[in-house]
Amino acid sequence: MPTPARHAVRTRRRSAHLPRWVALVLAVAIGGVGAVQARINGALATRLGDGMSAALVSFGSGLVVVALVVLTRPAARAAFRRLPADVRLGRLRWWQLVGGAAGALLVTAQAVAVPVLGVALFTVAVVAGQTGAGLAVDRAGLGPGGVTMLSRRRVMAALVAVFAVLVAVADRLGGTGFALGAAVFSLVAGGLTAAQQGVNGRVGMVTGQPFAATLVNFVAGSTTLCLILGARLVTTGVPALHFPSQWWLYLGGTCGVVFVAVASVIVVPLGVLLLGLAAVTGQLLGALLLDVVVPAHGARPSALTLLGVIITFGAVLLARSPRAPAVVD
């Protein structure tokens, strides 16, 4: 059986043959997949009649998909089986295996907030949360790159991102149809996702297998959602669910797996910095396109929402500037 190091070398060699422009197109495309996932989970929550149950369906379907992938890859199976030994020997901490709990919160936010906010406004809030919390995550050294000192550019980027959220929601704060709680929930979920990326990066670095780290993520997320739903069942009873017949409403989890699988290949020719920037670009563009073409509940993005997305993209560019320390994804 090949060692993780040998497998990583072979992966680099295969990816080196991928043209750089093709890798860039794929990075933008998987960013768009993230926007599609948000819309799917939001629509599923509406049809199903319960946001938390929709989040569990999404995470559960992703768990099944990534488990099947790991079962067909001997190196990934071996890496997953070694995780208890990695924790016992101190190569990983137990809490680094529960990053999926933050992912569960993000998927729940997609299911609950997207029908209220729309994909574009939801994406602005999540990106703002990721940018702000990324400062603390990098300073604490949670990611595989270790401690990254703060810089003026990155602090400014976080402030600009928060300002972008305020601009995007300015024309809706006084309206009865705007749910401020949904926007705050999305902001917090985005912030916790930054911590999730850090610990998942640690798991991927130690195992040498991104699919093994992805499986750990989906197991933790699915378990978290099951516990939350179990507690809710005890207090409020079983919700009345109406499972839709449209097959595409059950593809939210698969979107997450696709993102990880493609990113694990194209990160070699692009590097983490360029991959992250291109993926965020695709996510923002995809979110706007969805809200324009198929708006949630007929609510199209306003001019201020468009301006908020543009400012958010500027904040991402500022945070990703080569003059500042890069964010470790």
Image (cartoon, rainbow, N blue to C red):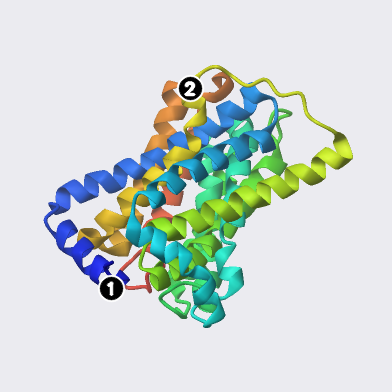
Residue drawn at the location 50% of the way across and 51% of the way down: 127
At label 2, which amino acid type do we have? Trp
- Name the quadrant containing residue 328: bottom left
Q: Is residue 8 above or below residue 297?
A: below
- Residue 202 at x, y percent in the picture: 46, 71
Residue situated furthest top in the rendering: 245
| Quadrant in which the C terminus is drawn | bottom left
Q: Which residue is mark 2?
A: 247
Image position of 229 (left or right of 84)? right
Q: Which residue is mark 1?
A: 5
Q: Secondary structure at mark 1?
A: helix
At label 1, which amino acid type do we have? Ala
Dot in front, 1 or 2: 1
**Viewer-closest of 166 and 10:** 10
What is the crowding at mark 2: few (fewer than 14 residues within 10 Å), some, or many (at least 20)?
A: few
- Name the quadrant containing residue 121: top right
- Residue 180 at x, y percent in the picture: 70, 41
